[in-house]
Image: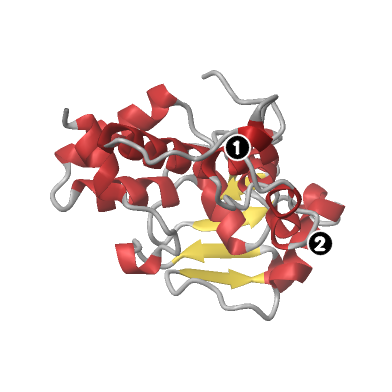
Amino acid sequence: MARYTGPVCRLCRSENEKLLLKGKRSLTEKCALERKAYPPGQHGTGRRRRRSSEYATQLREKQKVKRIYGVGEKQFRTLFTKAARVKGITGENLLISLEARLDNIVYRLGFAPSRKAARQLVRHRHVRVDGAAVDIPSFQVSPGQEISIAPAAQDTPVVREAMEDKKGKDQLSWLGVDYDNYTGRMLEQPSRADIPLAVQEQLIVELYSK
């Protein structure tokens, strides 16, 4: 799968919205969107954000969700196809599948400052699922499965700093975590109301239904 390897701050500026791609830094004055509140590129400062067409609005919503979770078009389309086959609301099923990705769970639990950092932990085999090392970021975690950080990675700065930042903050109701033992668990499958994401997933459904 082709991965975006450029500066992620450009993605937030393109969407004119904080996608939290740099974790805690995105919430400070160092965030590029705070300093450069205009589209990226040579003509960014002189470019007006015009009113978008219906198709453009739907496309932007899809691109935004892809960028938040760090998945490519092919993988995203595969998840959408599976979500459409499952009983329930397709858009909600899609978000639930994205939330159940191993890299996202590691990030949500607070073991990594961003999803990108979480993917790196997974790829380097620093994350275990029910005691077994898993190096596939897109691995779908099921309710009841335990996620843990391998002993060799527990003292790394990225893990410790992320945990310290997360401690004392509210955890999502469908996740349980034990920071003393570097373990977490997906307690249940989340509902749409349990996913703190300001997106209109119905626009994505409408886009793919054309």
In the rendered view, how is the structure colored?
A: secondary structure
The C terminus appears in which quarter of the rendering?
A: top left
N-terminal label among 2 and 1: 1
Identify the residue at horizontal 57%, vertical 37% (top origin): 14
Residue type at the position of mark 2:
Glu
Instruction: Kindly report the distance in space between the C-alpha atoms of the residues bearing marks 2 and 1.
Output: 25 Å
Residue type at the position of mark 1:
Leu
> In this view of the protein, which residue sits in the foreground, 57 or 208?
57
Report x, y in % for residue 186. 45, 62
Identify the residue at horizontal 53%, vertical 54% (top origin): 105
The answer to whether 159 is drawn above or below residue 128 in the figure is below
The answer to whether 192 is drawn above or below residue 39 in the figure is below
Q: Which mark is residue 161?
A: 2
Give left or right: position of 96 versus 47. left
- Furthest toward the bottom, the residue is 168
Helix, strand or loop under label 2: helix
Residue topped by disc 1: 11
Report x, y in % for residue 98. 41, 46
Contact between labelled residues 1 and 2, with CB atoms less than 8 Å apart: no
> In this view of the protein, which residue sits in the foreground, 74 or 135?
74
Camera-near label (2 vs 1) is: 1
- At label 1, counting other C-alpha atoms closer than 10 Å, the crowd grade (few under 14, some 14-19, many 20 or more) is many
Report x, y in % for residue 165. 75, 69
> In this view of the protein, which residue sits in the foreground, 200 or 38?
38
Specify whether residue 67 is in view. yes
Total labels drawn: 2
Specify whether residue 191 is in view. no
Report x, y in % for residue 102. 52, 46
Identify the residue at horizontal 86%, vertical 54% (top origin): 157
> In this view of the protein, which residue sits in the foreground, 200 or 94?
200
Identify the residue at horizontal 64%, vertical 42% (top origin): 38
Helix, strand or loop under label 1: helix
